[in-house]
Amino acid sequence: MKRALKLEQFKNKKGKWQARFVASNGKNLARSSDSYETQEALIEMLVDVLVEKHLPDIFKDAHGKWRWRYTKDGDTLIMATECYNNLRACIRCAKLVLEAMPEKLEAPKPEPVPEPVVPEPVVPEPVVPEPVVPEVIEETVAEEEPSTPAE
């Protein structure tokens, strides 16, 4: 079965994770209401909506247009990015979001990070000092002329 909406997980400009539901014509129909520090946290929220099969809150906005959102404990998890003149179209889109979620949500596996190459420590050759030879200081003694015996 071809899905009418495609679930996309992405990092926003602030580097946080969000989800959006895009129609086959490229139109963004729904999004996560919050951004998440990790992709795992985003997936946890999506799984919660999928597993709990939350009923959408359907309401009229300040302009009298129909909107929907999935909430839990008063917090909006996923919300429509479009408003609808027709209640039936609003409900249909909310259902399409649940149908767009895959059976199993997983974060893409990160590429393995290679272990850092740590060079073996270089052990310097022991420095053997050269033997110390004491410096011989020769004293020069002025030679005296031989003395002649006294007569």
Image (tube, grey):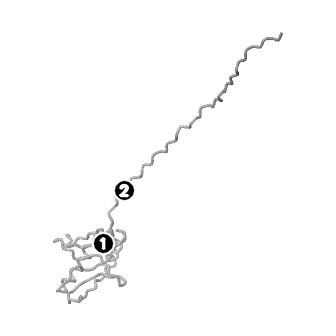
SS label for mark 1: strand
37 on left or right of 128: left
10 on left or right of 25: right
User: Toward the viewer: 15 or 147?
Assistant: 147
SS label for mark 2: loop
- Residue placed at 21% from the left, 80% from the top? 82
The three-letter amino acid code for the residue at tag 1 is Gln
| Quarter location, residue 8 | bottom left
In the picture, the disc for residue 38 is none
81 on left or right of 144: left
- Residue placed at 17% from the left, 86% from the top? 86
The three-letter amino acid code for the residue at tag 2 is Pro
* Residue positioned most to the front: 151
The number of numbered badges drawn on the structure is 2
- Residue placed at 21% from the left, 72% from the top? 22
User: Toward the viewer: 58 or 1?
Assistant: 58
* Residue positioned most to the right: 151
| x then y, percent, for residue 122 | 49, 42
- Residue placed at 67% from the left, 24% from the top? 138
| Quarter location, residue 113 | bottom left
Q: Disc 1 designates what residue?
A: 18
Locate the N terminus by quadrant: bottom left
Q: Is residue 58 above or below residue 122?
A: below
| Quarter location, residue 135 | top right
Numbered disc in front, either 1 or 2: 1
Q: Disc 2 designates what residue?
A: 112
| x then y, percent, for residue 28 | 21, 74
Return the disc, 1 or 2, that comes first in the chain's sequence.
1
Crowding at dot 2, Cα within 10 Å, few <14 / some 14-19 / many 20+, comes out as: few
| x then y, percent, for residue 121 | 49, 45
